[in-house]
Amino acid sequence: MSKETRMNPKEKISLLKELGMEGIAAKLLRKKTGKEKLLKAINDYRYATQEEIDDFNEEMREHNKELVIEEIKDSKKLPPDNVLVELRSAKNKGCFDKFHIAYIRAVKDPILFGKIDGFDTLYFYIAQWGDDVKIEEIIGTD
């Protein structure tokens, strides 16, 4: 029996490409990159899980309200200057693939979240404007 050889992910990706297995190499690279982004984001940002957001929304529905989350590219809400500065800082760190705005319908002050592809159940808090809805209320630390 031969002893199993273990390669680090970078070596494995390189070998897969060399062997013509581009699709698998690309998938492995995305997974590796996603994990690196996740570690960076967890160190720098608080986050809410999908479960926490669902629980918060359930509570909001009791008051005929709902937390809506949309991609920033679809948002019609103009963030204040301090939120734009935080957004630029988050973009420069390179750990998020997308950004989302979360707001309660009929309430004016939203929250800015970062998202990482492959980790769809995590919403990384970047900034909020005003205090109509706060991250502490969503994650239950208020």
Image (cartoon, rainbow, N blue to C red):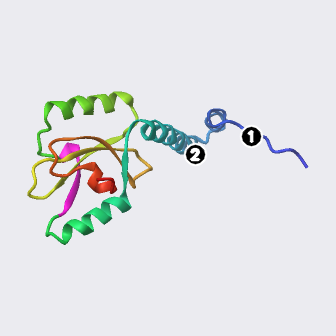
Q: Nearer the viewer, residue 135 or 54?
A: 135
Residue 35 screen position, x and y as percent: 51, 42
Q: Residue at (20%, 35%) from the top-left corner?
A: 83
Relative to 17, does residue 3 appear above or below in the rendering?
below
The image quarter containing residue 125 is top left
* Residue in the image at 28% along x and 49% along y: 135
Of labels 1 and 2, earlier in sequence is: 1
Residue position for label 2: 24
- 142 relative to 131 in the view: left or right: right
**Residue type, label 1:** Arg
Q: Quadrant of residue 138?
A: bottom left
The residue wearing badge 1 is: 6
State the count of labels.
2
Name the residue at the bottom extreme: 62
Position of residue 104 relative to residue 89, above or below, is: below
Magenta span of residues:
66-74
Q: Secondary structure at mark 2?
A: helix
Depth check, front residue: 77 or 58: 58
